[in-house]
C-alpha cells in the first residue's frame, strides 16, 4: 500500500529505522503496543501509512544454500586432511628416502611382537638396530663422529597417570646413538622412538615406523659433508609400552642426558597418516618457531595439546618423562589416522603409506637439522618465557605467536565487539533499555535453544545405549551424523521457529535476523574473554568467531538494511564467514578422527554414544551460531524440519533394528572389538600363610561399553551370569590387573576353567620383619617371576603405609585408596627386592597389610594354556582378542 504524498517522506524515515532496529507495521486491526516503540518521542502514536516490507528469504533457496556451503567446507577440510604430500620429493643422495625407511620398518615388524623381556625385544630387535647403525657408521663422512651405547637401566618412579601408581623396572634396554661433529659438541638435541610393542601386536605404527624414520635420518645426516653445530642423540628405547620406563632410565641415569637441551618425541595414536604436533614446550616458544621455520609439511594444533594435557585421552608419552624428570623442553608428534587398529594385530607395516613415511621423514629431518644448527639450543633455558599459540592452516603453513600476544589480541577483539554491541544498543539513546532487553532476550533464547538441543540429543543417546545399540556408528561414522546431527539441527531450528511464531509474532524479519546475529556475537565475545582469562591458548578459535563475523556484518550491513536477505547478501555473508567455518570444519575433523576410535577402547563405564552425541551437538551449536538468524529471515522452516526429522526417524529405526553392526573384519579397513582374556589361577592366604580360597578361570574384559553382548551369540558360555564378583577384602577386588584401570572396567566376566600349571611359576617370600621407631614395621620381600608383575598393597584399618623402597620413597595411592606397583624386567634381571614400612596400631590381630602379587606371562611357553587357545579360536573374526596366562596370590602380614 503506497503512502499519501504528504506523508511519504516521514513514513520512509520511519521504515528505515524499523528495517534495522524496529518492528514491522502491523495490520490496522492490530495496533502496535507501547512496548514496540512505535510512538513518537513525545509519547504519541506514530501516524502514517504502512510501507511494503522486504520479502524474507525463501526456504527453498536458503536452506539448500546453507547445506551446500557447509558440505563444501567439509569436503575441503577432508581433502586437506587426506593430502599427505603435494609432491613427494625424489630421494637424492642427501634427501630422506622413504623406500629405505620402509625396508627398516618391514624388517623390524617381521621380528613379531616385541614385548619387554621377550627375546624378540631384548635380543632380535636390538641386534637388528645395532647391525643397521654400524652399517650407517661405516658409510658416514669424516665430518661426523658416531658413538653407540647399549644401556640397561634399573630404576623406579611414581606417576599420576591412570589415577596414580608406581613403576619399577630392571635391566630394560636402550639403544643410543650420538652423532656429533668430529671435534665433539657440548650440547645436544634428542630424537626419541621406541621399538617395543604391546603384547600380541606387530606395532608397526606404534612405534616401529618412527624408529625406521630415525634410522634413515641418522643415515642421511651421517652422509652429509656439512658438520653440525650440536650433537644429535638418537634414543631407540625398548620399554615405552611399559608406561614410559626406558625413557626414565635414560634421562635420569645416562651420562649423555646431561647435554640434552631439547627433544623430539615420535609417537603414534593411530596407524599412518599425517603426524600431528600435539604437545610442545613447556614454555619454550622458540621450539614451535623452529618447527614453523623448518617443517616442510606442517600439521600442528595447540587445541590438541590442551585436549591431551587435560587427561581426557587415556594415554601418555615419553614427553612427560623428559619434561618432568629431565626438565627439558620438546616437541611431541604422533600419527593419528585410523586409531581403530592402534594396538591391535592389524597394526602392520603394509597399512602405512610410503607417502606418510616420506612426509614424517621430511619434517623430522628438517626440524632436527634446524635445531642442531641453532644458536638457541645452547641457551634454551634463556628462551623459556611463556606459552605459544600455534595452529596449522589446512596443512599449508603454521601460524604461531606468543600466548601473551594472543591474550592482548583476544581482549582487543572482545573489546571491539563490545563497542559494536554497545553502539547498537544505544541507537537511539532513548531506546537503550528496550534494545538491551531485546538483545538479552535473544541471547537467552539462543542459550536456551542450545540447552534444549543438548538435553534432547543426549536423551536419544542414552536410550540407544540402554537398548544395547551403542557404537552403531563405530564402523559407519555417517550414522552418527544422520542420527545425532540431524536431531541436533532439527531441535535447534524447532526452538527458534516456535520462538519466531509465538514469542516474536508479527515482528520484522530483518530486525530479528539482526538481533540474533548480535546475540551470537555476544556469546562468542563472552566465551573469548572467559577462555582467555582461563589462560587457554585455544581461545584463538573464539577470536576467529568474533573478528570475521563482525567484519562480515560491517561489510554487509548496508546491503542487508536496504534490500533485506537477498541472495547477494547471503553470498556475501557466507563468503565473509568462510575462514572461521572452514577452520572449524578442519579442526573438528581432526578431533573426530582422534576421538571416535578411542570410544572403542574407553572402558565399560563411559557411554560412547553420549560422548559422541555431545561432541556433535557442540559442533552443531558452533556451526549454527551465525546461521540462527537465517531461521528468522526465511519465510518458513517447515520443509527443512520435515527433511531433518525424516532422516532422524529413519536412522533411529534402523539403529534400533540393529542393522548397523558396530564392528568390522573388513581386511582393507578393519574396526575390531577389543577383548582381553587372562587365564588366571588365584590363591588367597590367611595370616598364617594357609590357602583359604583358590579358584581358576578365564577373566574377560571388553574394552568398550558393549561388554560381551555381541560375543555371547558366538560363545554362549560367556554371558552375564558369569559377571566377576569383587573380593572385598583384597586390594583391587582380588583381580590380576596389569595396570590400575579398574575404574574404567567395572564390568568384567570370569569363566571357570581348569587350573593352569606354569613351567616358570612366581616365587614370592618375605625376607624379614623389622620393628622401626614410632610404632612402625618394615617388611622386606623378594620376588622372582616373569617379565611383567603387578603388586597391590592395602594397609588394614588403623595402619598407614608411610614409606617404601620404591619411587622417591613416598607411596602414591591409586583411585580407591589401594597402592599399585607395576614391575617389568629385561633379560637376566636379578630377583626383585623391596620393602614397605607401615605405622601400626597397638593391636593388630588380623594383620596390618594385605599384599597381592600377580604374574603375567605375555610370551613364551607359558603364555597361553590349551583352554585359552581353544576359547580364542571361537571368537568371531571382528574381534581383536589378546590373551595370556597369569597368577594371583594374596597374602596377609
Image (cartoon, rainbow, N blue to C red):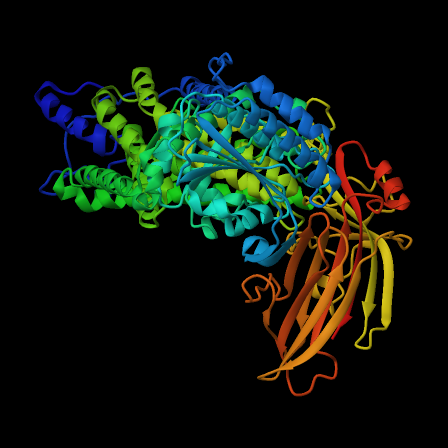
Q: Is residue 504 visible?
A: no
| Above or below for 556 versus 434 | above
Residue at horizontal 71%, vertical 68%? 781
Q: Is residue 645 left or right of residue 740?
A: left
Residue at the bottom extreme of this rendering: 842
Q: Quadrant of residue 525?
A: top left
Give residue 838's position: percent from left, percent from top: 63, 76
Give residue 12's position: percent from left, percent from top: 14, 23
Point out the image quarter for the C terminus.
bottom right
Count of residue discs: 0
Q: Is residue 395 left or right of residue 690?
A: left
Residue at horizontal 60%, vertical 61%? 814
Q: Is residue 423 left or right of residue 220?
A: left
Give residue 812's position: percent from left, percent from top: 57, 64
Point out the image quarter for the N terminus.
top left
Q: Is residue 712 visible?
A: yes
Give residue 170's position: percent from left, percent from top: 65, 53
| Above or below for 853 versus 708 | below
Q: Nearer the viewer, residue 283 or 410?
A: 283
Residue at horizontal 39%, vertical 33%? 371
Q: Nearer the viewer, residue 274 or 761?
A: 761
| Above or below for 841 versus 891 | below
Q: Is residue 807 left or right of residue 540?
A: right
Q: Nearer the viewer, residue 383 or 38?
A: 383
Amino acid at each position: 500500500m503506497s503512502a499519501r504524498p504528504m506523508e511519504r517522506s516521514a513514513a520512509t524515515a520511519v521504515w528505515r529505522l524499523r528495517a534495522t532496529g524496529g518492528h514491522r507495521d502491523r495490520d490496522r486491526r492490530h495496533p502496535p503496543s507501547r512496548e514496540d516503540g512505535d510512538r513518537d518521542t513525545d509519547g504519541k502514536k506514530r501516524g502514517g501509512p504502512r510501507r511494503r516490507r522486504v520479502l524474507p528469504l525463501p526456504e527453498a533457496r536458503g536452506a539448500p544454500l546453507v547445506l551446500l556451503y557447509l558440505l563444501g567446507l567439509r569436503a575441503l577440510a577432508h581433502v586437506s586432511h587426506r593430502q599427505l604430500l603435494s609432491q613427494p620429493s625424489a630421494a637424492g643422495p642427501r634427501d630422506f628416502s622413504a623406500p629405505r625407511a620402509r625396508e627398516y620398518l618391514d624388517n623390524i615388524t617381521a621380528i613379531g611382537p616385541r614385548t619387554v623381556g621377550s627375546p624378540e625385544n631384548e635380543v632380535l630387535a636390538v641386534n637388528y638396530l645395532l647391525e643397521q647403525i654400524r652399517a650407517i657408521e661405516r658409510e658416514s663422512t669424516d665430518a661426523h663422529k658416531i658413538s653407540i651405547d647399549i644401556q640397561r637401566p634399573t630404576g623406579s618412579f611414581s606417576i599420576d597417570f591412570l589415577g596414580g601408581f608406581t613403576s619399577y623396572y630392571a635391566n630394560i634396554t636402550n639403544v643410543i646413538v650420538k652423532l656429533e661433529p668430529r671435534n665433539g659438541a657440548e650440547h645436544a638435541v634428542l630424537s626419541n622412538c621406541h621399538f617395543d610393542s604391546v603384547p600380541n601386536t606387530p606395532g608397526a605404527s606404534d612405534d616401529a615406523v618412527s624408529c625406521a624414520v630415525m634410522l634413515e635420518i641418522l643415515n642421511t645426516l651421517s652422509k652429509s659433508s656439512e658438520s653440525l653445530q650440536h650433537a644429535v642423540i638418537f634414543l631407540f628405547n625398548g620399554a615405552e609400552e611399559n608406561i614410559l620406563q626406558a625413557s626414565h632410565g635414560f634421562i635420569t641415569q645416562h651420562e649423555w642426558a646431561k647435554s640434552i637441551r631439547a627433544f623430539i618425541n615420535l609417537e603414534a595414536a593411530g596407524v599412518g597418516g599425517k603426524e600431528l604436533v600435539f604437545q610442545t614446550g613447556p614454555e619454550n616458544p622458540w621450539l614451535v618457531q623452529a618447527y614453523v621455520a623448518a617443517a616442510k609439511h606442517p600439521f600442528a594444533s595447540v587445541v590438541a595439546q590442551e585436549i591431551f594435557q587435560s587427561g581426557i585421552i587415556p594415554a601418555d608419552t615419553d614427553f612427560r618423562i623428559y619434561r618432568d624428570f629431565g626438565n627439558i623442553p620438546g616437541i611431541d608428534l604422533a600419527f593419528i589416522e585410523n586409531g581403530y587398529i592402534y594396538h591391535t594385530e592389524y597394526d602392520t607395516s603394509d597399512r602405512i603409506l610410503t607417502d606418510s613415511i616420506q612426509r614424517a621423514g621430511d619434517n623430522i629431518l628438517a626440524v632436527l637439522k634446524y635445531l642442531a644448527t641453532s644458536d638457541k639450543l645452547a641457551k634454551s633455558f634463556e628462551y623459556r618465557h611463556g606459552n605459544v599459540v600455534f595452529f596449522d592452516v589446512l596443512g599449508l603453513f603454521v601460524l604461531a605467536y606468543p600466548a601473551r600476544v594472543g591474550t592482548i589480541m583476544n581482549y582487543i577483539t572482545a573489546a571491539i565487539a563490545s563497542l559494536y554491541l554497545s553502539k547498537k544498543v544505544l541507537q537511539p539513546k532513548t531506546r537503550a533499555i528496550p534494545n538491551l532487553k531485546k538483545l538479552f532476550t535473544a541471547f537467552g533464547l539462543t542459550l536456551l535453544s542450545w540447552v534444549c538441543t543438548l538435553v534432547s540429543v543426549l536423551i536419544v543417546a542414552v536410550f540407544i545405549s540402554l537398548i544395547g545399540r551403542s557404537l552403531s556408528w563405530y564402523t559407519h561414522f555417517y550414522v552418527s551424523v544422520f542420527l545425532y546431527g540431524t536431531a541436533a539441527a532439527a531441535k535447534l531450528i524447532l526452538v527458534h521457529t516456535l520462538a519466531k511464531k509465538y514469542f516474536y509474532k508479527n515482528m520484522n524479519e530483518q530486525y530479528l535476523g539482526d538481533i540474533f546475529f548480535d546475540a551470537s556475537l555476544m556469546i562468542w565475545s563472552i566465551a573469548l574473554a572467559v577462555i582467555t582469562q582461563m589462560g587457554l591458548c585455544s581461545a584463538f578459535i573464539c577470536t576467529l568467531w568474533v573478528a570475521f563475523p563482525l567484519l562480515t556484518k560491517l561489510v554487509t550491513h548496508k546491503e542487508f538494511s536496504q534490500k533485506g536477505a537477498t541472495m547477494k547478501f547471503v553470498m556475501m555473508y557466507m563468503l565473509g564467514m568462510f575462514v572461521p567455518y572452514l577452520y572449524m570444519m578442519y579442526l573438528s575433523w581432526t578431533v573426530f578422527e582422534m576421538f571416535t576410535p578411542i570410544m572403542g577402547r574407553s572402558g565399560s563405564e563411559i557411554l560412547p554414544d553420549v560422548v559422541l552425541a555431545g561432541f556433535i551437538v557442540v559442533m552443531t551449536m558452533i556451526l549454527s551460531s551465525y546461521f540462527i538468524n537465517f531461521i528468522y529471515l526465511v519465510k518458513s522452516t517447515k520443509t527443512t524440519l520435515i527433511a531433518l526429522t525424516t532422516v532422524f526417524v529413519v536412522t533411529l529405526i534402523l539403529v534400533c533394528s540393529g542393522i548397523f553392526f558396530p564392528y568390522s573384519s573388513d581386511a582393507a579397513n578393519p574396526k575390531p572389538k577389543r577383548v582381553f582374556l587372562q587365564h588366571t589361577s588365584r590363591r588367597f592366604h590367611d595370616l598364617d600363610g594357609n590357602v583359604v580360597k583358590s579358584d581358576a578361570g578365564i577373566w574377560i574384559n571388553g574394552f568398550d561399553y558393549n561388554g560381551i553382548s555381541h560375543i555371547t551369540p558366538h560363545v554362549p558360555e560367556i554371558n552375564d551370569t558369569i559377571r566377576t564378583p569383587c573380593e572385598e577384602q583384597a586390594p583391587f577386588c582380588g583381580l590380576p590387573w596389569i595396570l590400575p584401570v579398574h575404574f574404567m572396567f567395572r564390568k568384567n566376566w570370569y569363566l571357570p576353567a581348569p587350573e593352569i600349571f606354569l613351567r616358570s611359576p612366581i616365587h614370592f617370600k618375605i625376607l624379614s620383619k623389622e620393628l622401626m621407631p614410632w610404632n612402625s614395621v618394615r617388611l622386606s620381600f623378594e620376588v622372582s617371576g616373569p617379565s611383567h608383575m603387578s603388586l597391590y598393597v592395602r594397609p588394614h584399618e588403623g595402619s598407614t603405609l608411610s614409606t617404601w623402597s620404591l619411587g622417591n620413597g613416598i607411596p602414591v595411592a591409586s583411585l580407591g585408596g589401594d597402592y599399585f606397583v607395576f614391575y617389568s624386567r629385561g633379560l637376566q634381571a636379578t630377583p626383585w627386592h623391596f620393602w614397605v614400612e607401615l605405622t601400626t596400631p597397638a593391636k593388630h590381630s588380623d594383620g596390618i597389610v594385605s599384599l597381592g602379587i600377580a604374574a603375567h606371562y605375555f610370551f613364551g611357553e607359558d603364555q597361553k594354556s590349551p583352554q585359552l587357545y581353544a576359547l580364542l579360536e571361537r571368537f568371531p573374526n571382528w574381534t581383536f582378542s589378546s590373551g595370556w596366562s597369569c597368577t594371583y596370590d594374596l597374602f596377609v602380614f
